[in-house]
Amino acid sequence: MKKHVAKLRENFPHDPPRKAPSARDVTSWLTRHPDRLTDDQAQQLKTILTRCPALDRTSHHVRAFAELMNDRQGKHLDQWIAGVQADDLPALHTFVTGLGQDLDAVVAGLSLRYSSGAVEGHNNKIKMLKRQMFGRANFDLLRKRVLLTARGRS
């Protein structure tokens, strides 16, 4: 009996079942540049998008928005919004509604080369120092640490 089973196993090798990708994996693949996907990831994503037409349409809109951001093409945002609203994708409709609440700022953010990243970095650093010192020292020591950090001496 064992010999027969061994022959069958040799003639019909069993590939272990592939673990289904998680929602986090698929989201990562959708938001990553297609050139940065491995061949296996690209194939799995293609299979998933073939099975779910709504997700396929969503991925096209997400990639188009990423191009708007990367190429600083804020002037084309109206066309992108019109394309999203023409599709029946409720999650993206919510996103577009949020963009519309401050459309001028979004267009400026997608068009101008200026960024508030440096200011946000300082804010995060101050918040981190505040969290580290919570309940341990008074405001004077916090002030001193913030000033020393700004000078690069902490």
Image: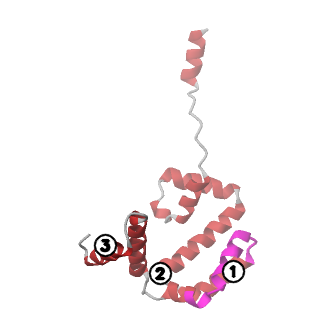
What mark, if any, has residue 12 been given in the picture?
Answer: none
Graded by Cα atoms within 10 Å as few (under 14), some (14 to 19) or many (20 or more), the crowding at tag 2 reads: few
**Figure label count:** 3
- Which is nearer the eye, 27 or 86? 27
Compared with residue 47, is residue 16 higher up or lower down, i.e. above or below?
Answer: above
Q: In the rendered image, which residue does mark 1 sit on? A: 97
- Tell me the quarter of the picture where residue 48 sits: bottom right
Q: What residue do we see at 38% from left, 71% from top?
A: 138
Q: Amino acid at mark 2?
A: Asp
Q: Main secondary structure of the magenta part?
A: helix
- Percent from the top left, x then y, of residue 62? 59, 71
Residue ID for mark 2: 71
Nearest-to-viewer mark from 2 and 1? 1
Question: Residue 118 appears at what percent x and percent y?
Answer: 38, 80
Alpha carbons under labels 2 and 3: distance apart: 39 Å
Q: Which residues are magenta?
A: 86-105
Q: Residue at x 53, y 74 (%)?
A: 66
Residue at the left extreme, as displayed: 153
Going by the numbered disc 3, the residue's amino acid type is Arg
Q: CA distance from mark 2 to mark 1?
A: 23 Å
The residue beneath circle 3 is: 145
Give, as a three-letter code, the residue at label 1: Thr
The location of residue 58, given as percent across then percent down, is 66, 68
Of marks 2 and 3, the one in the foreground? 3
**Alpha-carbon neighbours of circle 1 within 10 Å: few (<14), some, or many (≥20)?**
few
For label 1, the SS is: helix
**Side (left or right) of 51 relative to 63:** right
Nearest the viewer among 119 and 109 is 119
Relative vertical location of residue 64 with respect to residue 59 in this rendering, above or below: below
